[in-house]
Amino acid sequence: MTGGDYVAPGGPGGLRGRPRPVPWPRRALDPALGAALWELTAELTGITPDPV
């Protein structure tokens, strides 16, 4: 394992099974979706995240 690896269940559909490294889901790499998540986090918690 190295930094940035993504681990998920290794069984059918990634829903069950032993953990194993798998490719990152495309949605996890979407910058617009990430920005929207930061905004929603701030709105729901009242705390503005400070991404580094």
Image (spheres, rainbow, N blue to C red):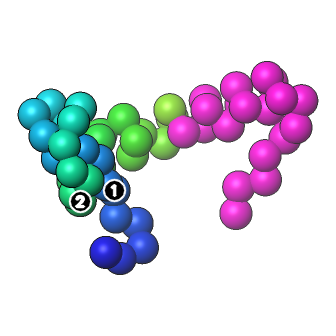
Question: Which image quarter: residue 5?
Answer: bottom left
Q: Quadrant of the N terminus?
A: bottom left
What predominant SS class does the magenta segment belong to? helix
32 left or right of 19 in image: right
- The image shows residue 48, relative to residue 5, as above or below, that is above
Residue at the image position 61 percent from the left and 29 percent from the top = 36
13 left or right of 37 in image: left
Q: What residue did someone put label 2 on?
A: 21
The residue nearer to you, when weighing 33 against 15, is 15
Q: Which residues are magenta?
A: 34-52
**What is the x, y in percent for residue 22?**
21, 53
33 left or right of 4 in image: right
The residue nearer to you, when weighing 9 against 38, is 9
Does the segment drawn in magenta span residue 45?
yes
Q: What residue did someone put label 1 on?
A: 6
Q: Residues within 10 Å of mark 1 (few under 14, many from 20)?
A: some
Q: Quadrant of the C terminus?
A: bottom right
- The image shows residue 46, relative to residue 1, as above or below, that is above
Could you tell me which secondary element the residue under label 2 belongs to?
strand
Tell me whether the residue at label 2 lies in contact with that at label 1, contact meaning CB atoms closer than 8 angstroms. Answer: yes
Could you tell me which secondary element the residue under label 1 belongs to?
loop
**What is the x, y in percent for residue 47?**
88, 37
